Amino acid sequence: MSSLTQEYITEKLQSKFEGAIQSIEMLHDFLTITVEKSSLKSIMKFLHDDESLNFHFLTTLCGLHFPDQAAQFGMMYQLHNMPANFRIRIKSFTNDSEPVFDTMSDIWPAANWQERETHDFYGFRFHGHPDMRRILNMDSLVGWPMRKEFPLEDPFRGDKDDKMFGR
């Protein structure tokens, strides 16, 4: 039985990063911690490097877009401590119109292509990333398809007649 608990993790983070933790909640059986953007990199490095926490596996990361909120852009990271089989979600938000976050590829090499994907679909930049370019979409694509302001359908398609779809 692992001694790693949500109480232990939150106490350790709150004592080390006083004031940087914005919220702690359980969402869908996931310990979810929202942190200040300015402290995100140091918190992530601490979660990775601390021997008692041991979050060596970056499961996923992705961009977030909530256009109706003051801090409309955010990043979400899911980390896994494999020996203890404990997962954690870290979120951070910004109100910058052109969001820039620090790269995590120097902590978890798997973040490299995941950050490129987030750049490709949301337009986020990652300070310190070794190869910030599109990974899935064509270079000629204008805009960021996962942002909520992106049109759901291509307005320039000539082969699609809306009458066929009851519109």
Image (spheres, helix red, strand yellow):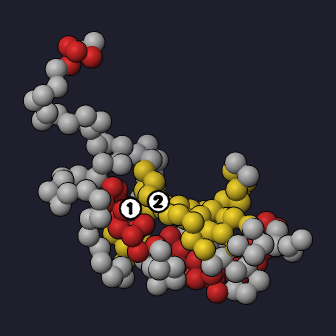
Residue 80 vs residue 9, the one in the foreground: 80
**Kind of residue sitting beneath label 1:** Thr
Earlier in the chain: of badge 2 and badge 1, it is 2
Q: Can you tell which quarter of the image residue 137 is in?
A: bottom left
Q: How many C-alpha atoms fall within 10 Å of the one at disc 2: few (<14), some, or many (≥20)?
A: some
Q: How many C-alpha atoms fall within 10 Å of the one at disc 1: few (<14), some, or many (≥20)?
A: many
Determine which residue is flagged by label 1. 118
At x 36%, y 79%, the residue is: 129
Give above or below for 17 relative to 100. Answer: below
Residue 36 vs residue 110, the one in the foreground: 110
Give above or below for 94 relative to 156. Answer: below
At x 58%, y 77%, the residue is: 44
Give above or below for 149 relative to 126. Answer: above
Label 2, label 1: how far apart the Cα atoms are: 6 Å
Pointers 2 and 1 in contact (C-beta within 8 Å): yes
Q: How many marks?
A: 2
Determine which residue is flagged by label 2. 62
- Give the quadrant of the N terminus: bottom right
